[in-house]
Image (spheres, grey):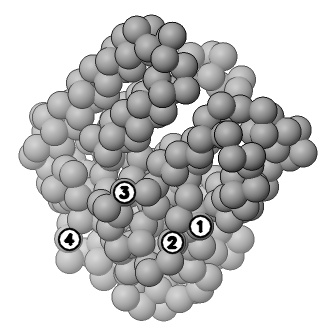
Amino acid sequence: MSPHDAEPTPQSIAALQGASVAFYLGSDFQPQVQRAVDALPDDVVAIDLLEVDSLRTIDSPIPGVVGEVDGEVLAGGRDPHMWVDPVLFSEMVRGIQDGLVAANPGCADAINANAEAYLADLAQLDEDFVSALATCETRTLVTSHAAFGYLADRYGLKQAPIAGISPEQEPNAQSLRAVAEVARADGVKTVFFEELVPPDLAEVVASEIGAQTAALDPVEGLPSDAVAEGESYVSIQRRNLDALRQGLGCTA
């Protein structure tokens, strides 16, 4: 299920109603969640982590691609996926830090210390992205999902999404020709797909345009068992960086 379609359970709604502060992604990115937050008691402080001025307009699909369009688009065609940019994600962490301190002033020292340590990890992640993606054979990022525009903007890449190909359907000949034209013109040798996209779709596109495929994670969810095993935003983004470095032919 897409995060856009997330629907709170009765148990999670009850937990929210007993909270001091609730963090959520608003701007109609998760309509069901937003409705639950809007219904919270007045004494629950609700903080919208997408309530910022820096939301970009989502990139248009590669011209000529036909099919269903990705639904994770905000009103006005704005792109909600700002967390894929480590620098903007750091701003979201600051918002969480400030909200927790306001709700728990007696724990401010511990909250601030933990937040600063995490922000240092994110700063190092940003530096590693800058270094690793400085020199690449191509700077065109062909993706199945228009979720990596903020990351592309941050590190001087150009996102070319194949939004319009439904994960449940193989692309038609027209869509394949459109993707192949961009791939040839920009020296693209790797098409990036999300792990949720069936592998047969990736194989069809790759074989038709003579490219390899690699997975990128839009960091839209992390199961509790993965967290228990040490998985995190930073570890996911480091895998993304390795995939980008190899797929774009970067030499750093």
Name the residue furthest right: 10
Q: CA distance from mark 1 to mark 2?
A: 6 Å
Q: To which residue does mark 4 refer? A: 186
Question: Which residue lies at the image location 48% right of the left edge and 91% below the top edge?
Answer: 174
Q: How many marks?
A: 4
Q: CA distance from mark 3 to mark 1?
A: 14 Å
Q: Are marks 1 and 2 in contact (CB under 8 Å)?
A: yes
User: Nearer the observer, disc 2 or disc 3?
Assistant: 3
Q: To which residue does mark 3 refer? A: 52
Q: Nearer the viewer, residue 99 or 133?
A: 99
Question: Which residue lies at the image location 45% right of the left edge and 8% below the top edge?
Answer: 110
Q: Which of marks 2 and 4 precedes in the sequence?
A: 2
For mark 3, give the secondary structure.
Answer: loop
Residue 77 at x, y percent in the picture: 44, 78
Q: CA distance from mark 1 to mark 4?
A: 35 Å
Packing grade of label 4 (10 A; few <14, some 14-19, many >=20) is some
Q: Nearer the viewer, residue 185 or 123?
A: 123
Q: Which of marks 3 and 2 precedes in the sequence?
A: 3
Residue 230 at x, y percent in the picture: 56, 16
Image height check: is 188 above or below 48? below
For mark 2, give the secondary structure.
Answer: loop
Q: To which residue does mark 1 refer? A: 28
Q: Nearer the viewer, residue 132 or 207?
A: 132
- Residue 85 visible in the snapshot: yes
Packing grade of label 2 (10 A; few <14, some 14-19, many >=20) is some
Q: CA distance from mark 2 to mark 3?
A: 13 Å
User: Nearer the observer, disc 3 or disc 4?
Assistant: 3
Name the residue type under label 1.
Asp
Q: To which residue does mark 2 refer? A: 74
Name the residue type under label 3.
Val
Residue 85 at x, y percent in the picture: 33, 46
Image height check: is 115 above or below 237? above
